Image (cartoon, coloured by chain):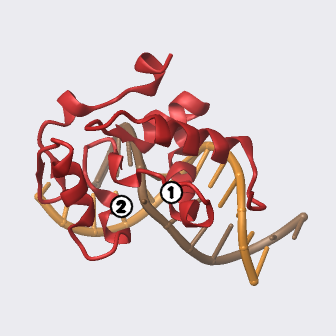
Chain colours: A red, B brown, C orange
Amino acid sequence: MPKTGTDFFERVYQVAELIPHGRVTSYGAIANYIGSYRGARMVGWAMNKCSSWNKYIPAHRVVNSKGLLTGKHHFPGGETMKELLENEGVIVEGNQIMNFSEVFWNPSEELL
DNA sequence: CCGATGACTTGAA
DNA sequence: CTTCAAGCCATCG
């Protein structure tokens, strides 16, 4: 367990791992489910630090509120995130998820 | 304690 | 359409 053992991080990773296959969610949604949607930055940062975690975090299923793959620049290669998402049935055009409203997974409702 | 950073979000220019 | 600004919160040096 890395030193960064805050409830915020733990919940972020927990929710991230609970994202259903073929679904996506937003940083704000996760943050909102945890406590404050303003903590979206922490969620994204948690994804960055996910490398420090021994667990696999499907960060490719986490996008911003517009369904944009804002974090794809942090993935190896350049189309890794898009490939992973499309491999799960998510339609991605450029950096934008087409069927975002269809694959969007709201933890506050489905994980409730 | 302080300042800087960040894969966000919203709203305004 | 693009760009900027402010708000928020945890972590790091």
**Picture residue at 53% right of the left edge, 38% below the top:** A31
Q: Are marks 1 and 2 in contact (CB under 8 Å)?
A: yes
Please tell me the numbered disc located at residue A71: 2
- Residue A55, compared with residue A97, is above or below; it is below
Give the SS element for disc 2: helix
Q: Which of the labelled discs sits on residue A47, or is there none?
A: 1
The residue nearer to you, when weighing A12 against C12, is: A12
**Where, quadrant-wise, is the N terminus of chain A in this rendering?**
bottom right
Q: In this view, does A101 lie to the left or right of A11?
A: left
Image mark count: 2
Q: Toward which corner of the image does residue A70 lie, by quadrant?
A: bottom left
Residue A63 appearing in the image: no
Mark yes or no: residue A79 visible. yes
A56 w.r.t. A26: above or below: below
Residue B7 position within the rendered picture, expressed as x and y whole percent measured from the top left: 43, 60
Q: Which residue is drawn at 27% across and 60% down?
A: A81
